[in-house]
Every structure is written in structure tokens, then in C-alpha cells.
Amino acid sequence: PNTEIREGTQVEERTFVYLKPNTIQRQLVGEVIRRFERRGLKIVGMKMLWMSKEQAVELYKEHIGKDFYEPLIKFVTSGPVVAMVLEGPHAIELVRHTIGNTDPLKASGGTIRGDYAISVRKNIVHASDSLESATREISLFFKAEELFDYPLLLEEHF
Ligand code: GDP
Ligand code: MG
């Protein structure tokens, strides 16, 4: 009998992801979400939102003062984004590998940024980079009742 869900992968994590405004403009929302789903990640929360200046500043506070900071804040608040929380074994690191390097010049083919991005600023997608930032970022954009606990019927096959 199968006593283990997702064999050898007990560390279930949640991570925060959002599709940047240019991804909505380029009509790549479905393409990007499909890649997360195919990886086997579970969508436990998802919504479209227009980020406030305050949310953007909080999200990117580690970058205050850098030369790319002001244009970045302006860009991410320039239009609606699609935000989600993804769950799975080692989801934080797994999603970072799936999206690829921040700089599209360095992102490998087969990664989301490596396949769809040409600009560092407009690099398609954001994902949390640590457990600490995932916790902080999820609570910045999602209320507890907007996140759902449910079984994925195919889970044992991933
Ligand atoms: P991420 O976690 O991979 O998104 O990268 P960072 O947290 O280091 O930076 C946040 C975002 O700022 C990146 O996704 C880029 O859009 C942007 N960014 C980071 N470094 C640079 C840079 O050197 N130049 C420009 N133009 N944008 C940058
Ligand atoms: Mg980051």
C-alpha cells in the first residue's frame, strides 16, 4: 500500500508568485501558470490585483536605494498582475528553479524567464526567495480565507 504522499518529498512549502504587468499585456498568463501546474505544484490561492505603491514598496524593501528600484516600483504598479500561492515539496526552491535567473541573459532555456523574458525589469514573474520572504509576501497579498487546503487527487503520481 502507498503510505507516502509524494515519495521522499516531505517538506511541503508555500511560496508567493506573481505575474508581472507585462505578462498580462503579452497574454502569457496561461503559458506561465501551465508551467507551474505541469511541474506538479498546487495552486492554493490566486487572484488578479493592481498592486498599490505601498505593497510594492513593502515587497521590494530590500532593494530601496538601488538604481533599478524606482523604475521597478513604477513598473509593477503600472497595471494589473496575477498573484498566486503555490504549494508543493520544497516549493520555494523548486519555483525559483522553474522561473530561472533574474537576468534573462543568464536564465537557462527551459526556465520561464529563459524562454519568455528579454528584460531584467520585465522578467515575467516574481517568486519568493526564502521561507522568510515567502511567509511575509503571502501575508502581504493574501488573507487566510483566500488560501485553500484541498487534496490534489493525482498527488501520489508526482
Ligand atoms: P528576483 O527575486 O529574481 O525577482 O530578483 P531581485 O529580488 O534581485 O530583484 C527584484 C526585481 O528587480 C527583479 O525581478 C528585476 O525585475 C529587478 N532587478 C533586479 N536587478 C536588476 C538590475 O540589475 N537591473 C534592472 N533593471 N532590474 C533589476
Ligand atoms: Mg527577489
Image (cartoon, rainbow, N blue to C red):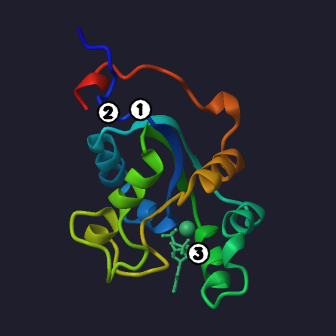
Label for residue 72? none
Sequence order check, earlier mark of 3 and 2 = 2
Q: Quadrant of residue 76?
A: bottom right
Picture layout, residue 104 above or below residue 35:
below
Q: Relative to the observer, which residue lies in front, 149 or 20?
A: 149
x, y percentage for residue 31?
Answer: 30, 53
Label 2 belongs to which residue?
Answer: 8
Label 1 belongs to which residue?
Answer: 10
Q: Relative to the observer, which residue lies in front, 77 or 44?
A: 44
Q: CA distance from mark 3 to mark 1?
A: 37 Å
User: At numbered mark 2, what does the secondary structure look like: helix, strand or loop?
Assistant: loop
Residue lying farthest bottom?
67
Sequence order check, earlier mark of 3 and 1 = 1
Q: Are the residues flagged by discs 1 and 2 in contact, CB closer than 8 Å?
A: yes
Residue 130 visible in rendering = yes
Q: CA distance from mark 1 to mark 2?
A: 6 Å
Disc 3 beta carbon < 8 A from ligand 1? yes
Q: Residues within 10 Å of mark 1 (few under 14, many from 20)?
A: few
Label 3 belongs to which residue?
Answer: 75
Residue lying farthest right?
54
Q: Amino acid at mark 1?
A: Gln
Q: Amino acid at mark 3?
A: Phe
User: At numbered mark 3, what does the secondary structure look like: helix, strand or loop?
Assistant: helix
The residue under the point 60% across, 86% down is: 68
Q: Relative to the observer, which residue lies in front, 7 or 45?
A: 7
Q: Relative to the observer, which residue lies in front, 118 or 10?
A: 10
The residue under the point 27% across, 23% down is: 156
Q: Amino acid at mark 2?
A: Gly
Q: CA distance from mark 3 to mark 2?
A: 40 Å
User: At numbered mark 1, what does the secondary structure look like: helix, strand or loop?
Assistant: loop
